[in-house]
Image (cartoon, coloured by chain):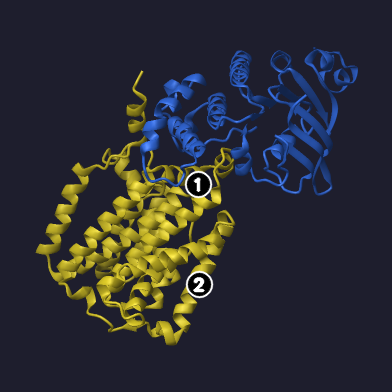
Chain colours: A blue, B yellow
Amino acid sequence: MDPILSARHIRKSYGAFVALRDISLDIPRGERHALIGPNGAGKSTFIACVAGQLSGVEGQMLFKDENVTALQPAALARRGIGRTFQISRAFLQMSVLENMMAAHVIASGRWASLSRAIYAERAERACAMLDTVGLADRARDRVADLSLGDRKRLEFGMALVGEPDLLLLDEPTAGMSIKERHALMEMVAARVDAEGRTLIFVEHDIDVVMKIAQRVTVMVRGAVLAAGTPAEIKANDEVQAVYLGGGH
Amino acid sequence: MTDPRILWAQVARAAVNWKLIAPLLIAVEALNWLAPASTSTMLTEIAILALFAASLNLLMSFGHMVSFGHAAYFGLGAYGFTLAVVRAGLPPEAALLAGPMVAALGGLIFGALCVRLTEIYFAMLTLACAQITYTVLFQWYDFTGGDTGITGFMTPRLGLSEAGYASFALWTVVLAVLALWVIVKSPLGLMIRAVGQDRARAEALGLGARKVQLTAFVIAAFFAGIAGTLYAVLHGSAFPDYAGLSLTLDGLIMVVLGGLNSFAGGIWGAVIYQLLSTFVPKVIHEWELVLGFVLLGICLAMPHGFVGLLKRLGLGRKGGK
């Protein structure tokens, strides 16, 4: 196994509350990996740790064999970690196309440029990405006017612009209908497979998880309860008792 | 499907509306040369404060950074110019560049401190930096002239007539505002807006938010410095009050009056504020009372300020910024 990400004894606490207790996890390159578990299990906290958004994280996070534990989010993004947020974050007062163009400007590294040449260079790719995520006809609309599902789609497209090696999606289908969830995640899976990216996603829809993930880690109260293929997780009695509840 | 470049041009709306602006500028120039000298001086002050407010607006409307100390850079511009003449012995024409450069340097030093924090803490740091600037200018008698300022070191207005200097100031401000427009519509401007709207999202995409904010801060300080320099030349003097809290508050009022979240907001706000402060006191002694009611009305009924009103009347640029 060639892990793109190795978490070693990750621990994060907020005062007396321990959000993550001694998490160790290897994510192989090119894998679609789901993090599941009840609310408060620490899934989003783990994603935030990987993305460098939390301070005071104990343990070691290795990304492509480099210790990135203390790096800031922007530095991690430049090294190849892209992400979307649990509560969708985009530039709300900009249009959809401006959001995508902003992602392109950042990915190009030409953020301080006064020349508008990059706009002409990247317009076609920005529009193509909007088409990929199904927002081509919303290009002129303000993001604040989009539905939650459309914002999530936009965020995913923006995260892809930087061509990340590791993509972290925190509840990417929250707020979507069942049909939309499957459609989005099938598109995500096809895209990451085609481009050879690694995917870690947090998801509550178990049907989506079983269909999309190649491996699953179940977290409960800040610790790993079980890890394995979807079939192994489904057959795990402890997981059934604590999280799946026998319904699957 | 629309061509992506055309679609981007429609979304970015970077074209300057010369059909509206050119006649306006010609009208102002005509008024300047036809009206009495006092009108030219008033137009000069309006133009200078419009640039000051536009520079503050870059921080507030685009970077979402509320500065309680922007007058510091106006003051540094004024003193940068004045001290370059008085202490360095430069001819005033050559010293014109010194003011904005000193202001930008001040912006770089203070900005590097301020962008370490966000929101109200950022605002309080800008206030602290401005108070330090004001106190140095006020107390350092040997160098800055202290509370009495520096006067009589040059012929006001570079020896030009009131109308001549008004014309010089007006076109300098027009060029400066155009430069700000170019910045706002550039990739850098897009980044300033991105960090202002969602810092975490910008960082997650790989953008160093502090670098962007510091760049915006220095740019805003530079343009405030141009305004301060023009003001010092207009009066042939520099006083600590140029860097005082009062001018910062005037700037904040101008931006809100004109309309937050719009490029033209600061400029319109400065025009309205200066007109109110010039003409209302001739009718009512307590003109601040009128200003207070105007601000109340704006905040309650027109949160997007004068520009928002223009849009509602179908006279402004539709959509965002």
**Chain of the residue under the numbered disc 2 shown in the image:** B
Q: Residue furthest left?
A: B34
Q: Is residue B52 above or below residue B152?
A: above
Q: Residue at x 18, y 50 (%)?
A: B24
Q: Residue at x 9, y 63 (%)?
A: B34
From the viewer's side, name the closer residue of B149 and B225: B225
Tell me which chain the residue with mark 1 is part of. Answer: B
Which amino acid type is marked by label 1? Gly
At which x and y percent is residue B5? Answer: 34, 28
Q: Position of residue B302 (x, y in %)?
A: 38, 47
Left or right of residue A28, residue A18 in this image = right
Q: Position of residue A236 (x, y in %)?
A: 87, 17
Which quadrant would residue A244 be assigned to in this image?
A: top right
Question: Which image quadrant for residue B248?
Answer: bottom left
Q: Quadrant of the C terminus of chain A?
A: top right
The residue that label 2 is drawn on is B131
Residue A113, numbered circle: none
Image location (x, y in percent) of residue B18: 21, 44
Q: Residues within 10 Å of mark 1 (few under 14, many from 20)?
A: many
Helix, strand or loop under label 2: helix
Q: Left or right: B162 with respect to A117?
A: left
Give neighbour class at mark 2: few <14, some 14-19, many 20+ (Cα, 10 Å): some
The disc placed on residue B196 is 1
In this rendered view, identify the residue nearer to me: B89 or A241.
Answer: B89
In the image shown, does B255 or A107 lie closer to the viewer?
A: A107
Q: Specify the quadrant that holds the N terminus of chain A.
A: top right
Res B210 visible: yes
Distance (Cα) linking label 2 and label 1: 25 Å
Q: Which amino acid type corresponds to the residue marked 2 in the rendered image?
A: Gln
User: Quick one: which residue is furthest to the bottom in this view?
Assistant: B142
Q: Residue B72: which quarter of the image?
A: bottom left
The correct choice, above or below, for A242 with respect to B43 in the image is above
